[in-house]
Amino acid sequence: MKQDNTIKHELTNFIDDSLIMKEIAKAENPAPSLVREVLNKGMERNGLTPFEAAVLLKNTDKDLDEAIFETAMSIKEAIYGNRLVLFAPLYITNECGNQCEYCGFAVKNRELKRRTLTSEEIHKEVAVLEDQGHKRLLLVYGEHPKHNADWIAQTVRDVYSVTSGKSGEIRRVNINCAPLDVEGFKKIHEVGIGTYQCFQETYHRPTYEKLHTGGKKTDFLWRLHAMHRAMEAGIDDVGIGALFGLYDSTFEVLALLHHSRQLERDHGVGPHTISFPRLEPALGSDIAFNPPHPTSGHEFKKIVAILRIAVPYTGLILTTRENADFRRELIEVGVSQLSAGSRTYPGAYSDPEYDRPDVQQFCIGDSRSLDEIILSIAGDHGYVPSWCTACYRMGRTGEHFMELAKNGFIQEFCLPNGLLTFKEYLEDYASDETKVAGNALIQREVEAYDDPKRKKILLDRLKRMEAGERDLYI
């Protein structure tokens, strides 16, 4: 039964540093038999405890690391198949009153050119993204005192109001903004946002307080309880995350899992998504160029794989901070959502002089266009790009979504709906090369579909799309 989301919560620190440190210490030098035992449990797709995740993180046996990757791949394939959800970030403002020592938007960074998009500029940016084929956006905001919930809500309305070309419209707006109070979250919920996303950055409070030295973000507990307030306001889907490189990566993974479990205890469902960006160079930040706790590629791949095993039904989001080749590896071991064609400053998509470090938040590693990424993942690797928003429009969110997901719902509905959104992209936006490769992939997927009833429905809708209909889903 869904719990009462109107319950108020005291701002207590539910991230118990001493408990996490004990879990890490207990997991040091795990016996191979214990690692295999944890992996066997993971294959049941019921998740892992934080301690069990620590056992996998602390494993140093290379063969068992490969077993971790294989387990994660098996779980991902069983739950998500070969479907990948695509989105693009849209930066609304880089004005910020916080002093985060690792971020290019830090208030003391005088080298950064500040900009907040007007309503007209938002319309222009959205039209460019729609003309590329995007249907899902993540709106990103710096935290500035003059930008309140009413203003954020209006920017969401602006985005949803834009239509361009034959099928250009944004069907899902997610939000990454500073924590609000419950009334503020209600305002952005009322305008139809999807997931509310906010990263704790680091869950280690002493490190957090050292790196956040000005602005509202100095309040660790206010940020930690942001998801509770969002869910109290009626937002079903929330996304948590940590910025890897600021503190010990094992601690951060376990803290993410404890955060997830706390949300389950208090609201009946954990986060809809988890993000795990690595610290990248940023204008005006020495720390960004020299991470205090650098995370190697192998360590990072293990983090992604172990999160997939630990929270099998939670979306794992990968940004364009990583390069194209490494993103391909991470997709295999657990990533289910991928940013594509990203630009990380206000006005970037309509900027003819793109790739200017004086305005962006951080350096990106994968600068390919949306079409280039789609050609790669679909044509070369057989993944189905998806912009599906059917669940949100049918009310299948939050706890209801998780219940359905655990019963095989994702494969039953999400794959055919993903194919339909992919077909829409191919019809209206794809290059000739991508269209050929994409239609070949759709044909293979339809031929392999083993539900005769749904296969018939899918074929009918694909034909209707070729005849000009749009926005069809099951």
Image (cartoon, rainbow, N blue to C red):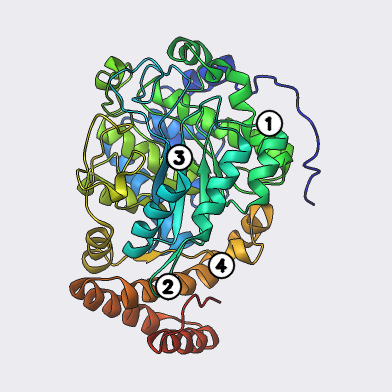
Judge from the rendering whether residue 342 lies leftward or rightward of residue 317; answer left or right: left
- Tag on residue 181? 1
- Residue type beneath disc 1: Asp
Work out how far the residue at label 3 is from the one at label 4, CA to CA, in angstroms.
23 Å
Work out how far the residue at label 2 is from the one at label 3, CA to CA, in angstroms.
24 Å
Q: Are circles 2 and 4 on residues that touch, CB within 8 Å?
A: no
> Judging from the image, what secondary structure is the residue with disc 1 in?
loop
- Residue type beneath disc 4: Ala
Q: Are circles 1 and 4 on residues that touch, CB within 8 Å?
A: no
Sequence-wise, which precedes: disc 1 or disc 2?
2
Residue 77 lies in quadrant? bottom left
Residue identified by numbered label 4:
390
Work out how far the residue at label 1 is from the one at label 3, CA to CA, in angstroms.
18 Å
Residue identified by numbered label 3:
140
Work out how far the residue at label 1 is from the one at label 2, CA to CA, in angstroms.
36 Å
- Residue 254 sits above or below residue 26 on the image: below
Whether residue 106 is visible, yes or no, is: yes
Judge from the rendering whether residue 264 lies leftward or rightward of residue 215; answer left or right: right
Residue 335 percent coordinates (x, y): 39, 50
Q: Quadrant of the C terminus?
A: bottom right
> Judging from the image, what secondary structure is the residue with disc 2 in?
loop
- Residue 219 sits above or below residue 60 on the image: above
Closer to the observer: label 2 or label 4?
2
Q: Residue at x 71, y 46 (%)?
A: 234
Sequence-wise, which precedes: disc 2 or disc 3?
3
